[in-house]
Amino acid sequence: MAGRGRPHRRRDPLTPGARFALRRLGIGAGQLAVLVALVFGLSLLLPGDAADVQSSDLYSDRQRAETRELLGLDVAPLLRFARWLGHAATGDFGTSYASGEPVSEVIAGPFAITGVMAAFTTILLLPLAGWAGFAAGLRPGSLRDRVITTVSVFFDAIPDFVLAVLLVAYVAIGLGLFPATFLGVDLGTMLAEPGYLVLPLVVMVARVAAPLVRLVRAGVIDVSAKPYVEQARRLGVGRVSLLLRHIAPNALGPAMQELGRTGDGLLSGVLIVEAVFALPGIASTLIGAIGDRDEPVILAIVLVTGAVAVLVNALIDLAGRRMAPSR
């Protein structure tokens, strides 16, 4: 009938990728809230609190109560947590119980050091794992493949602390090639003298590179045998174009997903590196805060670290989505 047309369909302003990103960030925000609440609850189970740590054995009960009141520990835990969350939402993480300094100042330096280590690890990890995986996968069964696979299995099998101690004992102390400790070293010295970074980076890269190399290798072997790759070869597609347009996007998808799951391994590697090399990073700061029962510092570190992990994993998921197998 005249005057009748198809009903107007409202167009969604968001692309599928944007909807996926928002959904992923929403899930991550919920996980982060649960994590912070869980860490706060677990911190309440620790014996004593910051007032007990700071109080001397000679303190009277009244002096202990005054210390607790001064630190704000006389407030009910749930109310204290709610207040901290409200201030944290505005960027104010409170004041450290141990030092009396703003928490943002306490954690800024350690986060910078750990961030530099994480950045250098990523810069080295991605091209190294990609190159080694492709080099092995393009010629499976060759001497090159066997050597790369053996090395990756070795570094995957050896514990982080063993590798770190061996490097300190034989490379730093025995051969004197690189510094063995970061005692007295700040971020400026680390950047001015890159030798300080070599051994810690070896441990951190080896921690996550080994499984990625094997995943890339397996992906390359699998994709190279696909019919569409064989057809591209028969049609005369050049080797470089074949690798970049057909093999790489499909072979790297599983490795990108694995990269998102290496956060726990990287964090444990950071803990070991900071312990062995006396690196004043965020992991060492967190351990010290737990010992001091420094609640604001603990919660701030967990919140910031968790937020970074959520963002990084969302970006990796988006990259993996873009690298979904194509035909």
Image (cartoon, grey):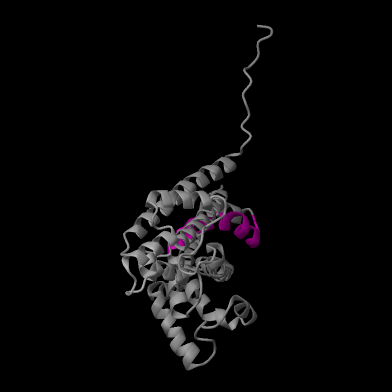
Where residue 322 appears, x then y in whole percent? 57, 49
Q: Is residue 12 magenta?
A: no
The segment highlighted magenta reads 236-264
Q: Is residue 75 visible?
A: yes
Q: Is residue 226 above or below residue 103?
A: above
- As drawn, 26 above or below 65: above
Farthest-out residue, top: 1
Residue at left offset 52%, top offset 47%: 25
Please name whichever residue, 262 or 135, is drawn nearer the observer in this view of the structure. 262
Q: What is the chief secondary structure element of the magenta stretch? A: helix
The quarter of the image holding the N terminus is top right
Residue at 50% across / 62% down in the picture? 216
Residue 167 position in % (x across, y down): 46, 84
- In the image shown, does 306 or 39 lie closer to the viewer? 39
Location of residue 319 in the rendering, given as x and y in whole percent from the top left corner: 56, 53
Viewed as shown, does residue 158 lie left or right of 321?
left
| Residue 2, percent from left and from top | 68, 7
Number of numbered labels in the structure image: 0
Residue 225 appearing in the image = no
Determine if the magenta segment contains residue 262. yes
